[in-house]
Image: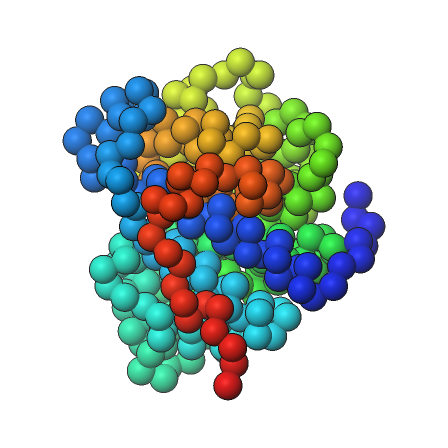
């Protein structure tokens, strides 16, 4: 299923915008439970902690990706690195490694060097490449080979480790397939993940995704968390398989997908951001509850500004 669809650049950008909206609402939705006492009780009773939801680094970096796609029609890595550094703000919940990396890029250091320096030269295998990539998958859904290539490029700027890159590719491909399946009855979780798996490089991430596919149909979210993780370790291996399990379980229902994901707790803003970007690509903007869009902090204006 790698046929090339036809779409105009404006249509591709519109798809990326929907993925960004879904990602950011998921990010802000999940973040309200991150520091709440008795967060699981709020989720169990489907009660919101806050009336206004603030988004995190997940949305901030995804907005840079959207901006670069809008300006260049592809991932220009140098421009993306500059945007990540320029728009960095310490209050948005960036991980410790990103504080240092983006600071160095902001001082003019080459992202190729500083990205590979992380973690004693291994590069980061965190979930940051995956959390921001859904707009890439939606934008290039016309061509799955392009999705893989561009997802890799988007991750490499900050996540040089192959596990971090594999996580980004998996989420981008999932978002692409979610769009390609629009207007159809959502497939089973097993079928959906089977579509994604062939495109993911051999890695621990891929093995965990295979495990997510093979969990029994009636598996509980707690069983899924015990088998797959929930982002608590903030690695791609501990995050991506769980998010594909959640997205595959509720691909046709944004609200149910987000409540399911939040019930797994862990790195809940990031897991909800990933699932939100994937599922929105299938259900469209109209599938996101309007009240949730209104509760979310507005997206940053700079992501939509014209290039001078």
**Visual colour scheme:** rainbow
Residue 9 screen position, x and y as percent: 69, 66
Q: Residue at x 32, y 63 (%)?
A: 98
Closest to the observer: 273 or 96? 273
Residue ranking furthest to the left = 37
Q: Is residue 182 visible?
A: yes
Which picture quadrant has residue 158?
Answer: bottom left
| Residue displayed at 47% across by 55% down | 132
User: 286 left or right of 29?
Assistant: right
Residue for point 59% across, 43% down: 284
The quadrant of the rendering that contains the N terminus is top right
Above or below: residue 44 compared with residue 150: above
The answer to whether residue 34 is seen in the rendering is no
| Near-viewer residue (11 or 67) | 11
- Rendered location of residue 78, percent (x, y): 50, 77
| Side (left or right) of 201 relative to 130 | right
The percent position of residue 204, horizontal first and vertical second, equals 51, 42
Count of all numbered marks drawn on residues in the image: 0
226 in relation to 270, above or below: above
- Give left or right: position of 45 versus 184: left
Determine whether 46 is above or below 237 in the image. Answer: above
Camera-side residue: 259 or 286? Answer: 286
Q: Quadrant of residue 73?
A: bottom right
In the rendered view, tell whether residue 107 sits above or below residue 293: below
Q: Identify the residue at horizontal 70%, vertical 28% (top origin).
A: 185
């Amino acid at each position: 299923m790698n046929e090339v669809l036809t779409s105009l650049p404006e249509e591709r950008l519109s798809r990326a915008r929907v993925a960004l909206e879904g990602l950011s609402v998921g990010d802000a939705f999940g973040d309200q439970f991150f520091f709440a006492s008795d967060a699981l009780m709020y989720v169990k009773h489907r009660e919101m902690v806050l009336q206004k939801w603030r988004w995190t680094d997940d949305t901030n970096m995804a907005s840079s990706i959207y901006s670069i796609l809008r300006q260049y029609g592809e991932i220009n890595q140098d421009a993306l690195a500059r945007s990540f550094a320029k728009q960095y703000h310490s209050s948005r919940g960036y991980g410790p490694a990103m504080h240092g990396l983006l600071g160095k890029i902001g001082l003019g250091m080459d992202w190729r060097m500083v990205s590979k320096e992380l973690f004693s030269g291994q590069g980061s295998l965190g979930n940051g490449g995956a959390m921001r990539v859904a707009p890439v998958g939606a934008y290039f859904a016309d061509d799955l080979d392009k999705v893989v290539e561009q997802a890799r490029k988007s991750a490499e700027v900050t996540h040089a480790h192959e596990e971090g890159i594999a996580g980004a590719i998996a989420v981008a491909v999932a978002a692409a397939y979610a769009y390609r399946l629009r207007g159809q009855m959502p497939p089973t979780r097993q079928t959906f993940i089977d579509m994604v798996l062939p495109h993911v490089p051999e890695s621990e991430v891929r093995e965990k995704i295979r495990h997510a596919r093979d969990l029994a149909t009636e598996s509980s979210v707690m069983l899924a968390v015990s088998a797959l993780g929930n982002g608590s370790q903030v690695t791609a291996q501990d995050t991506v398989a769980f998010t594909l399990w959640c997205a595959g379980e509720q691909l046709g229902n944004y609200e149910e997908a987000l409540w399911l994901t939040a019930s797994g707790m862990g790195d809940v803003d990031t897991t909800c951001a990933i699932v939100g970007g994937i599922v929105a690509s299938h259900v469209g903007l109209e599938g996101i509850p309007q009240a949730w869009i209104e509760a979310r902090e507005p997206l940053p204006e700079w992501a939509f500004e014209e290039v001078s």
